[in-house]
Image: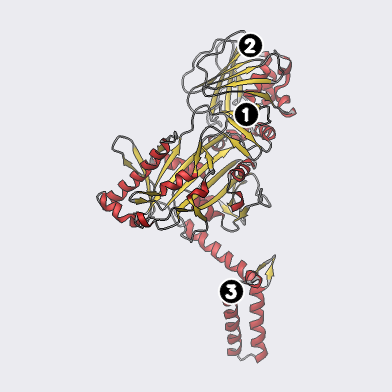
Amino acid sequence: MWLFRVLPPRLVVPVILLAVVASLIAIAARAPWWGGVIAGVAVAFAGLAPVRGTPAGMRLAGWMVFRWRSSRRRSMEPEPPFDVPLPDGGSCGTYWDGTRLTTMLRIDPPPDTLTLLRRGSLSTDQVLPLSEIARCLEQFDIGLESVDVISTGTRTANNEAVLSGYAYTVAPLMGMYHEILGPLPAIAHRTVWIVLRLDPLANAQAVSNRGGGGEGALRSAIIATRRVANRLAARGITASILTSAEMNGVMRQLTRGIAVEDYTELQNSLEHNGIHLVTYEIGEELIDADGLAQIWASPSLATTVTVRLRSARDPGAPAENRSAGVELEARVRYDMGAAPEAPPLPGLRELPRRQQWALLDGLPIGPRDTRPARGYRGPISALRGLMVPTAGCGQLIGADESGRGIAVPLIGDGSRRIDIVGSLHLAQQVILRAIALGAGVVVYTNRPGAWQRMVANVGAPHALSLASRTTGQRNVGMAPGAPHPAATVIVFDGVVASAPSGSATILTVHNGTTAPQLDADVTIIEHTATAHTVTVQTPATTTTARLVTTPTEQRYIGGALVDA
């Protein structure tokens, strides 16, 4: 009934009891009979009267629970993860919270993946099927309590550039790139982890079969982790087992390098030094391919989507009695410069006074409140079509004939080779966007005058500088303790390219008369007959794109428009 939704029994019954107690106290104090009535009515009115649409009693109870949980969490220091040696070398990071063993996998992105972007959808070469992950919950004699798929990413500079402070020094360029992207679900940098949790008590037989006790529990957890990795490998997806140090690194990335207790919990966000972490529960209407793409398209400093899968029945039950059903729970966290007044999308549900709980619950390591599951239940087949991209799309190059955005990774870990065959304007457009994604660029050129205006417009020597023509060194050195980029790009424009020491992206500008390298990771060729059109080549595919830009971007490039 509607009345029970407005005044639920869990509120009415305690308030009535308090009103009776207030009346009895008044009578015991020898107040007249009507004094007892007034005392009871006053307490009932105070507890049931609506305040901004919510009964005052519920607001008071929520505030008390919120404060109690906050003080309790601040006193809970998690034990650190530890390494367990693997038989074939290496180690598996493991975390024990007193009831569960936790291990983690990282999905290794495929190289040079080309992504097609459209408003509300994206198409990429490698995705992680959630139905395949759900089938890993029940593994012969081992049943996992839960599997979390955590996907975190940024539309511009990645978390490493943010944590070092580099991103803040190129914030205007990041804003420019956001303007270019518009509503496209373009996540330049993305990392996907799989968190596996095993309850040894629910798998007593499996633990006993592997030696029993702590040793048997650890063996069971590692075997379950390897089975998941092997299952993904059969689909062409490479997953690496994380060590304890890498698990700690994940924690640092997910908390932005800030201790959880240092965040201040507000009504609908966690705040620290002007950065707000805002977590929403993802409603059923958004749990599909289009809905997830819309979630990623919302502007933010960083976006983290966590999907938790559980078996619909006790994972410790005999295999023949286990259900093929699955329970799904999903949340998204936006890291923002200001807390929004309302969710950015219909279907995202606010979690008032539960932001610290949401952060802790989504972390792979640390204390978690036990509570009844609130997920959506259904058969594993219902997850068909729900995919998680395993890598970032890289940087936007242009759009194809149908209007889909074309993006490809140009910067990243390790050494990479990029060839640009075309005008200086094209090269500078690509480089400007790379800076917005967190790269620091050094240019070796035989025409420094053509670069000076862009260098001056960027106005950040640690982000874009020219190497000296006489010494070959950077004109401006990096000061000790200065913010450092997440990646380095070395540009050779009109000079012979040479491999530098260390890892970097080598970008060579060809004027059309010199042939590009055959072993380049990505080649961008400008069409001479068709204006503003390029061909993008990777080892896996070739496509044609029409360049897209904005007036803001052109102002940064400046005089390159007239330079051939």
Residue 153 seen in render: yes
- Look at the image and name its color scheme: secondary structure
Front one among 297 and 482: 297
Q: Would you place residue 489 above or below residue 143 in this image? A: above
Q: Earlier in the sequence, mark 3 or mark 2?
A: 3
**What kind of residue is marked 2?**
Asn
- What residue sits right under mark 2 in the picture? 511
Look at the numbered disc 2 and give the secondary structure of its residue. loop
Residue 299 placement (x, y as % from top left): 65, 41
Q: Residue 464: horizontal and vertical position, in percent?
A: 61, 23
Residue type, mark 1 in image = Ile
The quarter in which the C terminus is drawn is: top right
| Crowding at mark 3 (Cα within 10 Å: few <14, some 14-19, many 20+) | few
- In the depicted structure, whether residue 82 falls above or below residue 117: below
Residue 37 lies, with reference to residue 78, above or below; the image says below
Q: Earlier in the sequence, mark 2 or mark 1?
A: 1
Estimate the spatial distance between the alpha carbons at disc 3 and disc 1, rounded to whole Å: 55 Å
Closer mark to the observer between disc 2 and disc 1: 1
Q: CA distance from mark 3 to mark 2?
A: 77 Å
- Nearest the viewer among 118 and 519 is 118
User: Which quadrant of the figure contains the N terminus?
Assistant: bottom right
Task: Judge by depth and name the residue closer to the eye, 515 or 404.
Answer: 404
Find numbered disc 3 in the image and state the secondary structure of the residue it sits on: helix
Q: Amino acid at mark 3?
A: Pro
The residue singled out by tag 3 in the image is: 9
Q: Position of residue 344 (x, y in %)?
A: 66, 48
To which residue does mark 1 refer?
406
